[in-house]
Amino acid sequence: MSLISRFQYSQNFLRTSLRKAGRITLKCKFSKMFKVFLVRYGEELRYRMVHESGSSLKETYIPQLGTSGILEDAPRRAELNDILENSWDYATGANFTISGQDIVTSVNFLNENFEILNLGRFGPVEGVKLVIVIQVHNRSNYLGYLIESLRSAKGIQDALLVFSHDINVAVINEMVRNITFARVIQIYYPYNTQLFPHIFPGQDFRDCPERIGKTAAEAMRCQNYEHPDKYGNYRVAKLTQIKHHWWWKMNFVFDGIYDRYALTEPWVLLLEEDHFVAPDALHVLDKIIQNRKTYCEKCEIISLGFYLKSYTNYGNHIAKLGAHPWYSSKHNMGMAFRRETWMKVKNCSELFCKYDDYNWDWSLMHVVVKCLSERFRVIFTKSPRVIHIGDCGVHTHRCNAHNAYAAAVEVMRKHAGVLFPEQLTVADVSRRSPKPSKENGGWGDVRDHALCRANTYPLSTAAHRIPELSDLLKSTVHIGPNATRKGVL
């Protein structure tokens, strides 16, 4: 079912429901507005990928299953136009003007009326035992590997997969919508830099260059010259978006999914597009949850990931756990926790949103140290069941995705006989924690603080009526014969 069809299906469902309730129906204007939004979304993606890459084509590698049953890199190449033409279903010949407010309203409507895939096969959402939330950007090769590893995870049929996107790409949507082994929901961060590349929270051309320095910025009178970070640098949109997306996603999952379906028991497991999940990951997670009071009653977080320097002793530690104070750079991968734990973090939203660090995990570390009455403790697997394979990322471009994936697959193959342990033991207990590092900066702009506060309440329209978003909401884009591709302003 295309995205337009999904929208129309949701609209028809709501229309019927509202009639039954004796209320007014949705109007066709919104449907037209939504179609225009889709056109704008596709056009901006085309502009950015072509013009920022410096060429008319961008090679996109799509992982596929090889004859061995393992995903392989680049058996074929998809041209940019092929990907973009399939990103959205929309009629050609459009000739409309759409506002930033309409775009945000459209994305919010899509998020709040999401389609849940595979309900007929696995039953209603109320029956899930685990919610797995995956933060997705644009690395389709890694995402393909993650999905394939999830497919092989025992117990995945009892989970709800929530894919949270900050960019819309056809090949990624196709991967997600082709999942048949679990219930699936897709949500989209509405204030992303693909939709708004040239106006806050995108990289507004009126903003100060990152490293211009405050003195030069003041002389230049760029619009955010008064708000550098503690190191004198100015915001970079592609970096700040990661923290914004993470915070919005977490609040939406609990407010928009857990609350809607009255999910009180399931834990949430956090993954990212460049993670690999072991076949027994959910088995081990369930064992820890069921025996948490025995292993470490005060441990509110479970971490299935751990950054090993070597996998030489992987088999020797396969059934061993550790119990330490939670520390962001050690225990931020494959984190699992309950709603009660999240509410402690959410109640410290002001500290999270103002802390001068563009990294969500170090911001969370600051909350844990400075705001909570008692620091979080974590149970972690000594032999990780979530492995980071993302050599390619925001800061690194010299890499090979398939090599890291193949290495993870080989670790699992080599230790297949000792996976799925029946008994786990806590072999490493500590109350000492390294001193948190200083903030990394990149988060000094008061507009980011304000947007972060607003994203604490993703379902509230009123919470997002803030001056910092006024330019975005009042901006307009014309779609049609005379349209420009150069931005939202």
Image (cartoon, helix red, strand yellow):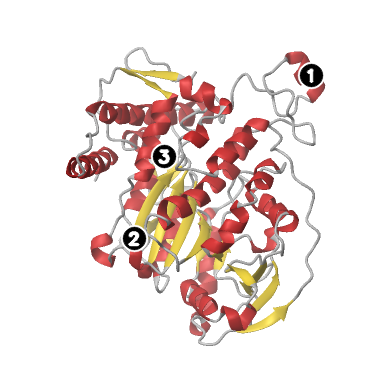
Q: Contact, CB < 8 Å: mark 3 with mark 2?
A: no
Instruction: Give the image location of residue 175, x and y in percent.
Output: 36, 51
Please name the residue shown 65% across and 51% down the image.
Answer: 348
Please name the residue shown 69% across and 67% down the image.
Answer: 309
Q: Is residue 472 left or right of residue 78?
A: right
Height in image: 485 above or below 145? above
Height in image: 459 above or below 126? above
Residue labelled with disc 2: 183
As shown in the figure, which amino acid type bears the numbered disc 2? Arg
Q: Secondary structure at mark 2?
A: strand
* Residue that protrudes farthest toward the top in the picture: 482
Q: Nearer the viewer, residue 328 or 89?
A: 328
Residue labelled with disc 1: 216
Label 2 – label 1 distance at C-alpha: 53 Å
Q: Residues within 10 Å of mark 3 (few under 14, many from 20)?
A: many
Query: Could you tell which of marks 2 and 1 lies nearer the N-terminus?
Result: 2
Q: Is residue 297 left or right of residue 8?
A: right
As shown in the figure, which amino acid type bears the numbered disc 1? Ala
Q: Nearer the viewer, residue 16 or 237?
A: 16
Query: Could you tell which of marks 3 and 1 lies nearer the N-terminus?
Result: 3
Residue labelled with disc 3: 168
Label 3 – label 2 distance at C-alpha: 20 Å
Q: Secondary structure at mark 1?
A: helix
Please name the residue shown 51% across and 34% down the image.
Answer: 464
Instruction: Give the image location of residue 42, x and y in percent.
Output: 38, 31
Q: Foreground mark, 3 or 2?
A: 2
Please name the residue shown 44% across and 65% down the image.
Answer: 264
Instruction: Give the image location of residue 159, x and y in percent.
Output: 39, 66
Q: Quadrant of residue 149?
A: bottom left
Q: Quadrant of residue 450?
A: top right
As shown in the figure, which amino acid type bears the numbered disc 3? Asn
Q: Residues within 10 Å of mark 1 (few under 14, many from 20)?
A: some
